[in-house]
Amino acid sequence: GNSVTQMEGPVTLSEEAFLTINCTYTATGYPSLFWYVQYPGEGLQLLLKATKADDKGSNKGFEATYRKETTSFHLEKGSVQVSDSAVYFCALRIPNFGNEKLTFGTGTRLTIIP
Amino acid sequence: EAQVTQNPRYLITVTGKKLTVTCSQNMNHEYMSWYRQDPGLGLRQIYYSMNVEVTDKGDVPEGYKVSRKEKRNFPLILESPSPNQTSLYFCASSLSDTQYFGPGTRLTVL
């Protein structure tokens, strides 16, 4: 079946540090890949996405590249801010007619200290 | 403002007492879905609906019911809640590749 594996958290970084959160996947077919962010007390928000191999998704300084050869979609940011503290979820979806189900990783809690 | 709303946000109840969590979206999306979030497990899909009167099971449907009588509403029903249904529940609606999530309902079943 389809699955997503994220690096274990929690991750604590100082402000302006470089961030990488690893994500690898197993999927039948050709998945679309996503990063969602969950701020405290809120629902999930789409951060970025990529729909085919070698696509790069980017938003708010975050980037992730769809690597089919390594089945990975690692999240990166060059200089994190305190406001980036949240839980980050990697997810995939197999495009088909019908269920739009997202398969999620377990989430990585990120804390940025000033 | 485009949004998905859920009510209640917090609920503490007892085993066996029927409850309904409401979900409503104002984006005219055809697809809606319910997930539960548990520590170490991420989010798992409970039920989904592709359109009015069309619903189907997700990965963890046991103990839950849904209905879709109107496009905007997709309530989650727990006929006889049990403690293992204590969780954080999210409703989502979808257009193409993007899913929009509600703020969540934290349910505790004693």
Image: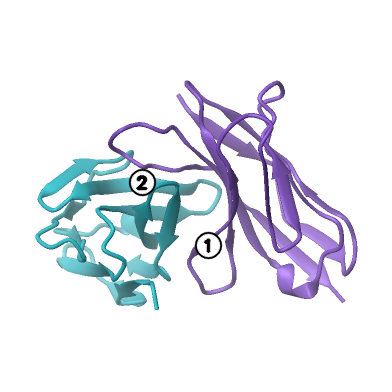
Chain colours: A purple, B cyan
Residue B45: numbered disc: 2
Horizontal side of B22 relative to B92 (left or right) equals left
- Viewer-proximal residue among B27 and B89: B27
Q: Residue at x 51, y 62 (%)?
A: A44
Q: Report if the CB atoms under discs 1 and 2 are less than 8 Å apart.
A: no
Chain letter belonging to callout 2 = B
Crowd tier of the residue under label 1, counting other residues whose Cα lies within 10 Å: few below 14, some 14–19, many 20 or above: some
**Relative to A16, residue A106 above or below:** above
- Viewer-proximal residue among A80 and B97: B97
Q: Is residue A102 at all visible to an observer of this figure? A: yes
Identity, as a three-letter code, of the amino acid under mark 2: Gln
Horizontal side of B96 relative to A31 (left or right) equals left
Q: Position of residue B2 (x, y in %)?
A: 38, 72
Q: Position of residue B10 (x, y in %)?
A: 36, 76
Q: Is residue A105 at all visible to an observer of this figure? A: no
> Where is residue A112, by image quadrant?
bottom right
Q: Residue at x 36, y 58 (%)?
A: B92
Q: Position of residue A111 (x, y in %)?
A: 75, 66
**Relative to B37, residue A90 above or below:** above
Identity, as a three-letter code, of the amino acid under mark 1: Gln
**Viewer-side label of 1, 2:** 1
Residue A45: numbered disc: 1
Q: Residue at x 56, y 48 (%)?
A: B40
- Viewer-proximal residue among B95 and A38: B95
